[in-house]
Image: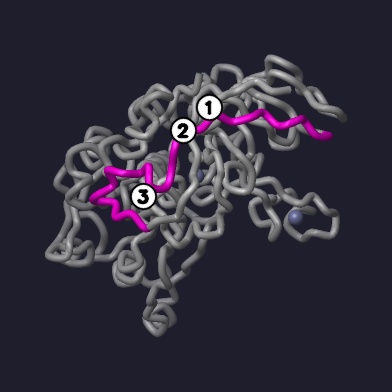
Amino acid sequence: MSTSIKGFCLHGSEKIKPATATDLSLNTNIVEMEVPELKEGELLAKTLYTGICGSDNSATLGKPNFDWVERPRIIGHEFSAEVLELGPGDHGDIKVGDVFTPLAMLGCQDEECPACSVAKWNLCPSKQIIGFHRNGGFGQRVVLETDRVVQLMEGLTPQQGALVEPLSIIVNALHNKCAIKPGQDVVVTGCGIIGLMSAELARAAGARVAITGIAQDRGVRLKKAKERGFIALEVGPENTLSQQLSKGVKDAKGIAFGNNGKVDLLIECSGVPQVLTEAISVVRPEGDICVIATYPTAVEINATHLTRTSLNMRGSMGSCREDYMVAQKLMVTGVFPSEHYTNFYDFENITQAFEDAIRAKNVKAVIKMN
Ligand SMILES: [Zn+2]
Ligand SMILES: [Zn+2]
């Protein structure tokens, strides 16, 4: 097979400052790519819609937490696609024409693997992430393992299909890791799509939610949050989250948010080390901190304060098949209003989409791939 197709390729790891991210071509370019021969258990698919993840942004900016990604690499792990061809081997009930989204993380599936033996591929030490360990959804064609396929639920559009993976991460973090209860006050730090999705699912679980952003988020992301009725807090070195909470934050009805400057749960989605450092000072004793972000450097934590307040801090990594099923349902039933947060771009404008995403000019950039 030798059909020539295009892909958005990560080839470099130069450090690019987000504020001056005008030349992503230092690290990325559009390439003609060859479709590889299908191996046992693999299929060929035409990508439909692919979302840009914060981790894709980090990789294109050459951030050190993505040093491990082999270059060149066609990135992209949040996508919908249509099956074009099945390779040799058993593909179960998957057939040509099926529209699906892949599990971003494929476990080793060894019976002896503690994670894979309980179907938690996201925790497998040798998991393979599509778009990082092998070419992914920013190619106009993609070859992947049939084991990754999650067929789209009836009623879910291919556009929404591109959002299943990120939403599934929030499902895992909020439904499996944090014990959110109705009536709780929750702060989400960071208003990228992971933060906004967290805000939506926390409220759907009965919490009252405030979400933070910085000055560059004012025009788009904090505005989107406000339109959805969340308490939107712009934070900065002169007006930190803890300062604002201690001074007193009110909701839209003028009712005090939090209790003496403390909240029940903080969900960290910013990836900024100082934000996590500050987080433990704004959560009430025996409250919870859920960490979904990753960080470019080590994070300083006042562990004594953690002990003395009996805080629970937990991380949440990725998601697995059952979280994908819940994520789809949340979009089909309108619990998560995907259209409010999605900005579509044609494939020709993919570099622009990345630059807009890095400068917070969009919320969730989704590329129409073909
Ligand atoms: Zn992602
Ligand atoms: Zn495993």
Indicate whether 301 appears above or below 192: below
Give the crowd class for mark 1: few <14, some 14-19, many >=20 residues within 10 Å. some
Residue in the foreground of this view, choosing between 74 and 186: 74
Lower sequence index among marks 3 and 1:
1
Residue in the foreground of this view, choosing between 85 and 239: 85
Indicate whether 80 appears above or below 174: above
Q: Position of residue 346 (x, y in %)?
A: 40, 22
11 is within the stretch colored magenta = no
Q: What residue does disc 2 label?
A: 30
Lower sequence index among marks 2 and 3:
2
Amino acid, disc 1: Lys
25 is within the stretch colored magenta = yes
Q: CA distance from mark 3 to mark 1?
A: 49 Å
Amino acid, disc 3: Gly
Q: Which residue is at a point 29% across and 37% down the rendered structure image?
A: 356
Amino acid, disc 2: Ile
Q: Position of residue 75 (x, y in %)?
A: 53, 41
Would you identify the image quadrant in which residue 82 lies? Answer: top right
Q: What residue does disc 1 label?
A: 6
Q: Which residue is at a point 39% across and 77% down the rendered structure image?
A: 301
Q: What residue does disc 3 label?
A: 183
Q: Are marks 2 and 1 in contact (CB under 8 Å)?
A: yes
Q: Which residue is at a point 25% across and 37% down the rendered structure image?
A: 361
Would you identify the image quadrant in which residue 64 lies? Answer: bottom left
> Is 284 placed left or right of 20 in the picture?
right
Q: Position of residue 161 (x, y in %)?
A: 53, 27
Query: Element at badge 1?
Result: strand
- What span is in magenta? 15-40
Q: Which residue is at a point 87% across and 30% down the rendered structure image?
A: 89
